[in-house]
Image: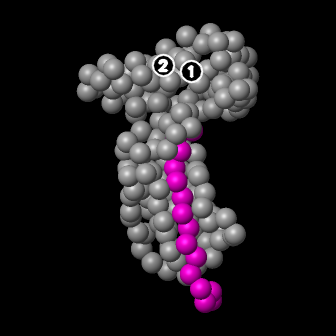
Amino acid sequence: MPSSENTFHFCFIDQDRNLPITNTPLEIIILNDKESPFKTRTSKDGCITWITKDDYIHFVVQSPYHKTDTIYRIASSNLHEKLQIRTDDYALMLHYYANGKIDDWKNRRNQLSKILSKDAIIFQVLPYGLGIEIFKKEEFINKLTTPTQSLKNIEIIESQKRNGQIVKLKFRVKS
């Protein structure tokens, strides 16, 4: 059994914007082997610190507007880490539509426009080997900012960036 304590420090970054997630606290559920899960939230700066005698940390990150993720890290020399969390566009767009947040919706469209290169190659892999569908930048932004069932099931397969912008994006809609 370890004799010293390990201090884990994580800050959460929005994968799309590459900025700290500070506007909505993330719920963190620490999973322990011998105890019930412990719930906590990120601080105002979008970070958490966890001190334990264990040589690892295992936790779930949840947010109303980000995809749930499970993280497992073993204690190492670098216990300060920035973790990227994927945006849940469906939940975010539904929130904007349901609450009449037109300015927030427009801001999200602008963010996506800055993230995607004007010459981005965007294609959807169709199910059952039917081929691909190609999207123009504006068509894809429309797809990501309209809360439809297909938006809820979008899965990014691959993306390539150049100069901080996405130049190639391959996705599918899970059924």
Q: Is residue 62 above or below residue 145?
A: below
Residue at 29% x, 23% y is: 101
Mark 2 highlights which residue? 110
Q: Position of residue 147 (x, y in %)?
A: 41, 23
Which part of the image, by quadrant, shows the C terminus? Answer: top right
Element at label 1: helix
Say which residue label 1 marks. Answer: 114
Taking the spot 69% from the left edge, 70% from the top edge, the residue there is 76
The crowding category of the residue bearing disc 2, from other C-alpha atoms within 10 Å (few below 14, some 14 to 19, many at least 20), is: few
Above or below: residue 116 compared with residue 39: above
Q: Residues within 10 Å of mark 1 (few under 14, many from 20)?
A: some
**Rendered location of residue 1, percent (x, y):** 62, 89
Q: Residue 107: percent from the left, percent from the top? A: 42, 22
Q: In the image, 5: left or right of 90? A: right
Determine whether, in the image, residue 106 is placed left or right of residue 55: left
In front: 163, or 135?
163
Q: Quadrant of residue 18?
A: top right
Residue 35 seen in render: yes
Query: In this picture, is 66 found above or below 174?
Result: below
Residue at image location 55% in from the left, 72% down from the top: 7
Side of 102 where 162 appears, left or right: right
The reply, left or right, for residue 154 in relation to residue 169 is left
For the question of whether residue 148 can be seen, the reply is no
